[in-house]
Image (tube, rainbow, N blue to C red):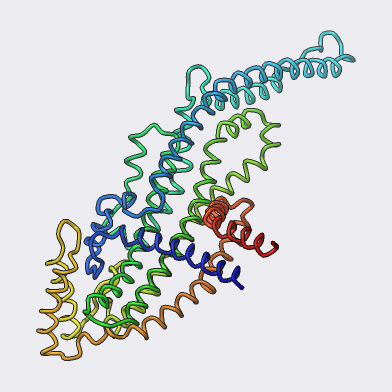
């Protein structure tokens, strides 16, 4: 019994620390006190994404990922230099062997065919020989040019090949995600500008990848901001109570769990694209000889499928986060305030949300939040105390005319029940359905890098639990 109690305490402490770190990460990524964001510009400024979505605050481990990409990029360049400088020489030697063997066989076969002919008729037609030789030579020259033959191409050409094949996949996925979430109305992806100014091999992947992560991060922070708003309303005595605080806390946890889960799915996509970039010289070299190309056609086809599946998966991941935010924002709009009119008072207006035909009472509520946000904002950060003082004064003025104008802030129980239902709907219905459609389109994952990294993190984090289990088990036996 003591061992079980100890294990329960340890599991609780480990879970509490993990949850605490996650909530701290989200709250520290939102500038100032999260009480309301009536403007997309204000929200993106608060999270540091006003100029470039890839620079948003709170991007999970982005600094470490950038360093990792730098290390991989340098390793890739060394790998390319080691291979590229010799591949075209191998191809040249291979062409010499091919020319010697093919010419010998061609002359031998031609001599056999003309052996029974008269001396005056004996001649060898080299047209067929030349056709095959020049085609083979052209393939080698094209592949060799890309790989650095005759001081042409080399790693510079390979960089441009990766940019025109790999970069569009991530960039288009990032742009589609930003348009769907509405972030593109107030920010942009500066990936293409950055890529053109850099010679790094993995920059074509890194920068659009950061835009996708930045968009995912922005939507996650927007959902968490709604939860923090409810918690702050209750904590500052502006509306609601303990249930409203719990509803906000549940909303924060929901976006925390789903946001991290989607991050690791994006990481799997990027790993595939890195694989394609690293082994690109071998794909090009395989093209030089038709028999080798036919033999490696399965590998090349698989590489193309990986590229296509990466593009589809990026769009699917963006779709997941958009559906999640759409359902939550609709529910929040129905409660804060009701009826649905495009304004929720707690969630930033993503997905091109705008107020639609508000009545006089709703317009008074909207103006109260907008004015107090304007007054409390300083350098992109919101001062809670200033907001509270402004809100208290404006609320008293509005409620003299509309006594029940702010009653919606106390309906934490109804909102929490709806959030639980929406979370269950997303987690057990919507997300599995999108994954099923994705699997039928791109096939099952043979190696899910993101899932393995996620499991590795779980295993490391569970070390205290495993140690406690060993100790309690040993004490029990003793």
Q: Quadrant of the C terminus?
A: bottom right
Closer to the camera in the image, 193 or 238 = 238
Between 23 and 260, the one lying in front of the other is 23
**In the depicted structure, whether residue 438 falls above or below residue 56:** below
Q: Residue at x 28, y 68 (%)?
A: 348
Measuring from the top left, give residue 2's x and y in whole percent. 59, 70
Q: Is residue 69 left or right of residue 229?
A: right
Q: Quadrant of residue 234?
A: bottom left
Residue at image coords 67%, 37%: 296
The residue positioned 44% from the left and 65% from the top of the image is 16
Residue appearing at x 82%, y 19% in the figure: 109
Looking at this view, name the residue that lies furthest to the right.
116
- Where is residue 423 shown, x and y percent of the image? 46, 75
Above or below, 99 relative to 63:
above
Q: Nearer the viewer, residue 61 or 365?
A: 61
* Quarter of image, res 335: bottom left
């Amino acid at each position: 019994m003591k061992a079980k109690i100890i294990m329960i305490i340890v599991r609780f402490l480990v879970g509490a620390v993990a949850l605490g770190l996650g909530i701290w990460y989200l709250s520290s990524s939102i500038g100032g006190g999260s009480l309301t964001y009536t403007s997309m510009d204000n929200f993106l400024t608060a999270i540091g994404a006003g100029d470039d979505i890839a620079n948003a605050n709170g991007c999970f481990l982005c600094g470490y990922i950038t360093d990792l990409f730098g290390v991989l990029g340098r390793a890739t360049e060394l790998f390319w230099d080691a291979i590229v400088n010799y591949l075209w020489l191998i191809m040249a030697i291979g062409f010499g062997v091919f020319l010697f063997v093919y010419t010998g066989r061609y002359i031998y076969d031609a001599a056999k065919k003309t052996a029974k002919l008269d001396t005056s008729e004996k001649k060898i037609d080299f047209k067929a020989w030349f056709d095959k030789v020049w085609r083979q030579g052209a393939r080698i020259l094209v592949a060799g040019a890309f790989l650095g033959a005759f001081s042409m191409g080399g790693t510079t050409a390979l960089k441009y090949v990766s940019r025109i094949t790999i970069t569009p996949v991530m960039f288009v996925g990032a742009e589609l995600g930003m348009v769907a979430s509405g972030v593109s109305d107030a920010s942009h992806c500066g990936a293409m500008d950055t890529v053109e100014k850099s010679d790094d091999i993995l920059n074509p992947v890194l920068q659009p990848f950061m835009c996708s992560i930045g968009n995912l991060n922005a939507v996650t922070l927007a959902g968490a901001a709604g939860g923090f708003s409810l918690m702050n309303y209750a904590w500052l005595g502006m509306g609601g109570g303990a249930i409203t605080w719990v509803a906000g806390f549940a909303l924060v946890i929901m976006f925390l769990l789903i946001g991290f889960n989607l991050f690791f799915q994006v990481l799997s996509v990027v790993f595939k694209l890195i694989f394609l970039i690293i082994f690109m010289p071998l794909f090009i070299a395989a093209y030089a000889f038709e028999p080798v190309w036919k033999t490696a056609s399965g590998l090349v086809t698989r590489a193309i499928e990986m590229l296509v599946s990466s593009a589809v998966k990026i769009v699917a991941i963006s779709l997941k986060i958009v559906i999640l935010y759409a359902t939550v924002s609709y529910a929040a709009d129905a409660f804060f305030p009701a009826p649905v009119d495009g304004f929720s008072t707690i969630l930033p207006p993503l997905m091109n949300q705008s107020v639609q035909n508000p009545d006089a009472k709703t317009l008074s509520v909207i103006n109260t939040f907008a004015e107090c946000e304007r007054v409390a904002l300083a350098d992109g950060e919101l001062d809670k105390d200033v907001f509270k003082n402004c809100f208290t004064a404006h609320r008293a003025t509005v409620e003299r005319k509309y006594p029940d104008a702010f009653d919606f802030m106390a309906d934490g129980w109804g909102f929490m029940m709806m959030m639980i239902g929406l979370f269950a709907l997303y987690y057990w219905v919507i997300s599995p359905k999108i994954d099923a459609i994705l699997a039928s389109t791109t096939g099952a994952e043979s190696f899910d890098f993101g899932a393995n990294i996620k499991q590795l993190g779980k295993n490391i984090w569970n070390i205290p639990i495993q140690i406690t289990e060993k100790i309690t088990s040993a004490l029990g036996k003793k």
